[in-house]
């Protein structure tokens, strides 16, 4: 995975976290949702030969 893609994912993760905190007004819930979303996107951005599923 390229460094550019990782940088874009991290930037989007931060933006999503800010947005969710504003909408939900609950920092813990916002962090949980943002992390879950980031994990899903990251998993699908990985090459097909690597699997994070258990």
Image (tube, rainbow, N blue to C red):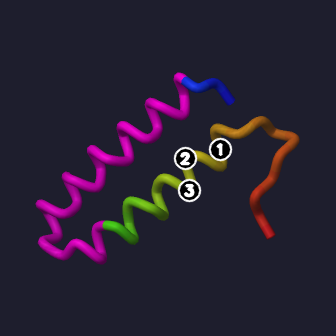
Question: Where is mark 1, residue-wise?
Answer: 44
Q: CA distance from mark 1 to mark 3?
A: 9 Å
Q: Secondary structure at mark 3?
A: helix
Image quarter (top left, top right, bottom left or bottom right) of the C terminus:
bottom right
Residue 31 horizontal side relative to residue 6, left or right: left
Residue 53 lies in magenta, yes or no? no
Q: Are marks 2 and 1 in contact (CB under 8 Å)?
A: yes
By secondary structure, the bulk of the magenta-drawn segment is best described as helix
Is 32 on the left-hand or right-hand side of 3?
A: left
**Neighbours of disc 3 within 10 Å: few (<14), some (14-19), many (20+):** some
Marks 3/2: CA distance?
A: 6 Å
The secondary element bearing badge 2 is classed as helix
- Vertical arrangement, residue 2 with respect to residue 23, above or below: above
- How far across and how far down the image is residue 4, in percent? 53, 23
**Residue drawn at the location 81% of the way across and 39% of the way down:** 48
Marks 2/1: CA–CA distance? 5 Å
Horizontal and vertical percent position of residue 6: 54, 34
Q: Position of residue 50 (x, y in %)?
A: 83, 46
**Residue holding disc 3:** 39
Describe the element under mark 1 as helix, strand or loop.
helix
Q: In this picture, which residue range is highlighted in magenta?
A: 4-30
- Residue 15, compared with residue 52, is above or below; it is above
Q: Read off the residue under disc 2.
A: 41
């Amino acid at each position: 995975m390229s460094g550019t893609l990782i940088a874009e994912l991290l930037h989007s993760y931060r933006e999503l976290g800010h947005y969710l905190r504003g909408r939900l007004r609950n920092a813990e819930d916002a962090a949980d949702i943002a992390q879950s979303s980031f994990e899903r996107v990251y998993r699908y951005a990985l090459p097909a030969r690597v699997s994070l599923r258990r």
